[in-house]
Image (tube, grey):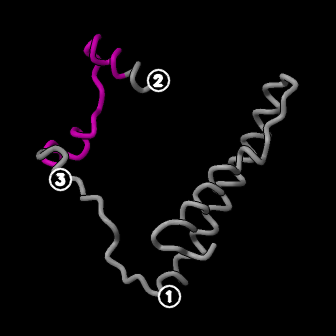
Amino acid sequence: AVTICTIITKLFKLSATTLADVSGAETFRGGFSVLPKIALPNVPFTLETLQIIAPFAITMAAVGAIESLLTMQLLDGIADDGHRGSTKKRMCWPRFGKYCLRYSRWNWRL
């Protein structure tokens, strides 16, 4: 929808407020060089850091799993094609990630 509206706006030369209009053209000079660099955070890899991050990571993983299962339930109800989604298949990729970590160079105990 965004792409279609953008094309229509450009083709018919409609007036539209852009980010450059709102924040100023100087904000976007330099292109991608003004964006922050992607890197690992500069935090120590200690047990204390893990204790701070772990509850949030577990919560986010649980929310993602629940969202995935609820979406499957919703689509099963909408698609009424006689087939039901498999929770074993749906939860396959998180288990795959767990096994990758288990046998990775970090050898974490999962």
Q: Residue at x 25, y 15 (%)?
A: 13
Mark 3 crowdedness (10 Å alpha carbons): few <14, some 14-19, many ≥20: few
Q: Is-magenta flag for residue 18?
A: yes
Q: Is residue 96 above or below residue 22?
A: below
Identify residue for label 1: 47
Q: Residue at x 44, y 86 (%)?
A: 46
Earlier sequence position, callout 3 versus callout 1: 3
Mark 2 crowdedness (10 Å alpha carbons): few <14, some 14-19, many ≥20: few
The reply to whether the C-beta atoms of the residues labelled 3 and 2 are less than 8 Å apart is no
> SS at mark 2?
loop
Residue 63 % position (x, y): 66, 58
Quadrant holding the C terminus: bottom right
Q: Amino acid at mark 3?
A: Val
Determine which of the numbered discs, if any, sits on residue 9 in the image. Answer: none
User: Taking 108 as reference, is 15 left or right?
Assistant: left
User: Magenta segment, which residues?
Assistant: 6-28
Identify residue for label 2: 1
In this view of the protein, which residue sits in the foreground, 1 or 32? 32
User: Taking 86 as reference, is 15 left or right?
Assistant: left
